[in-house]
Structures are given as structure tokens and as C-alpha cells.
Amino acid sequence: MLRLEARPQPSKALSIASPLIALAITVVVGVLLFALLGKDPVKGLQAFFVEPVKSGYALSELSVKAVPLVLIALGLAVCFRSNVWNIGAEGQFVVGALAAGWVAMQAGPGTAWLGRGIMPLILLAGVAGGMAWAAVVALLRDRFNASEILVSLMLVYVADMLLAYLVYGPWKDPQGYNFPQTITFDAVTKIPRLVTGLRMNIGVLIALLAVAGLWAFLFRSYRGFALQVGGLAPAAARYAGFSSRRALWTALLISGGLAGLAGGLEAAGPLGQLTPYVPAGYGFAAIIVAFVGRLHPVGIVFSAVLMSMFYIGGELAQSRLGLPKALTGVFQGLLLFALLACDTLIHYRIRVSTKGAAR
């Protein structure tokens, strides 16, 4: 019988290298997968790891995918470090997009005096929407001790249904040929682009500022220290007088706000309107991004770029190699599985027990 035995001293070097080992395992399994599907493994790997970074246009598209992943994963890192399991960032992303989209749709002659000043209001609305959706989770956990895992996850489906109701109903564009979509947002509401002709926008700068701000919060502030102590050692946190209730609300509101900000950037940036396809799976993929990045703001940037390459690579593999779109999810799942396996074997060794067999 096999059992796991804790190692006396896990290797620090292997712990740091674990994401790279997991990536290498993912690549090897990917090569085998391409071969089994009858496709050229070199072309398959090129689609995932070369094409997304080979030109300025490719890097621009990479940034469009990476920005929401970075923002959402940063918020999830705060939650997970605080031992608060927010699994519903996708719903907070959608509600943030709805709130931002509503503000964007108000642009017109009556708001002309705001000019480009309406753009910060759109992003603030996205933050407020995401925080409000996360506050529902915090309230139910705080008052009724409801599981934040189940509540946050179920609220994703509520957010999706709310989006569908609005774009099929009250917010439906009357000039949209009966398609389920809102009006196209006015040009003044669009997120400014960094490079003319490319879709890279100021979301890149906002994400980098969020990385720096969260790093300072987690590792250079008293409140961030209190959150992490509460996650690592709840009993010690209570003894030190740290409020678990405050930690719960702080973690969820930060996470929801960042997910909502990502939704606002997506709605007023690449999308330019609301459709039933606003949910892109970023909220769930960001969970993998957070753990591959070791719940560290800087590590999250690199893991978000890697995950974005998987998104773009999956699209290229579908169009050029005729592979199913689900391959993106396969690579994401492989990476997470390999990371969990590596971490387990770094902290535990496998022992063969003969006691059960003897009986």
C-alpha cells in the first residue's frame, strides 16, 4: 500500500523551481498529445510558445489576454493568502463589466462636458460592481457562516443569468438586428490604446500599478501582514488581536474590486459592448495563474503571460492545425495538475507499506 510521508526538510530550491518543472512536464505531455492526435508536435509547440510572442501585434494580443488574468489573480492571491477561498471571481468579473457597461451606455450629449473624464467613472463602476458582488459572499460567510467556496461559485451562474437577461431584454440594442447585445459604446468611453493600430491599452499600466500596490500592501504594510498571519496561523492571529472578520471583508472586497476592474477594462476595451460572451473563463483560469505564480504579485505576472500564451496558442491550434478549442483547457489543467504533483512530491515522499498487504 502506498502512503505519503512528510519530508523533514523540503528542498527550497525545488520549491522555487516547481512551476518551471511543472511547465516542462506540461510541454512533454503536450508533445505526446500532439503526436497521438496525428499532428506535428513542433508546429503544435510553435503555436503555443512562439507565435504569441513573435511580433508586435502578437505581443499586443498577448497583453489583452494577460491584463484581466493579472488583475483577477492578484485579488485571488490576497484571498488565498488570507485563507479565504474565493472561487467566484468570474462572477465578479461579469458584474464589474455590467456596471462599467451601464455607465458607458449613459455617454451622450448630456455627458459631453465630461469628455474623456467618463473613462475613470467607467472603471470605478467596474470596481464597485465587483466589490458589491464579493460583498454578498462576505456577508453570508460573516453572518451565517456559509461556505464562501459554494456561495462565490453559485453567484457566477447568477451573474451569467443577469447578463443574459439584460442583453436579451432591457439593454438589447434596438438597432442590433435582434442580436443579444447592447449598443456599441461611444468612442469617448473606450479605453485608450498605447500603440496606434494595436489593441494594447492602458490596462497594461493599470495592471503593473496594481502589482506594485499589492506587493507593498502584502509585504510592507501592517494590514497585509495581519491578513497573511490570519491565513497561515488563525490561532496566532486571534492571540495577536487580529480581526478575522476584518480580514474576510478586506480580502473579498479587494479580490472583487480587482475582478470588477478587469471586467470594466474588458467591456470598455476590447469588447466595446456587452454580449452573452463577456464571460471568458478568466476568473477560473486566474486561480491557476495565482498558484503557478506562487501567490506572489511578481510571479503572477509571469504566470499570467504563460496562461495567455495558452489561450492564444489554443486559438491558433484550432485554426491552423484543426485541433479542438478545448485544447486550451487541457493545457491549463495539465499545468495545474503537474504543479500540484510537484508540490506534493517536494513536501512528501512516497512510502510503500507492507502492513496492509500482510493482512
Image: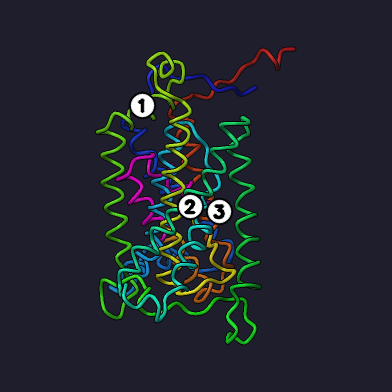
Residue 236 position, x and y percent, is 41, 16
Q: Is residue 136 left or right of residue 16?
A: right
Task: Identify the residue under disc 3.
Answer: 91
Residue placed at 47% from the left, 64% from the top?
41
Task: Identify the residue under disc 1.
Answer: 226
Reply yes or no: does residue 13 show up in magenta: no
Q: Nearer the viewer, residue 28 or 243?
A: 243
Disc sitting over residue 254 in the figure: none
Residue placed at 53% from the left, 59% from the top?
94
Predominant SS of the magenta segment? helix
Instruction: Answer with mark 1 or mark 2, whichever residue precedes in sequence.
Output: 2
Q: Secondary structure at mark 2?
A: helix
Q: Secondary structure at mark 3?
A: helix
Q: How many marks?
A: 3
Q: Note whether 44 is above or below 356 in the view shown.
A: below
Disc sitting over residue 130 in the figure: 2
Q: Crowding near pointer 1: few (<14 within 10 Å), some, many (20+)?
A: many
Q: Nearer the viewer, residue 169 or 251?
A: 169
Identify residue type, mark 1: Ala
User: Looking at the rendering, in which quadrant would you find the N terminus?
Assistant: top right
**Image-quadrant location for residue 239:** top left
Q: Which residues are magenta?
A: 283-308
Q: Note whether 116 is above or below 284 in the view shown.
A: below
Residue placed at 31% from the left, 32% from the top?
13
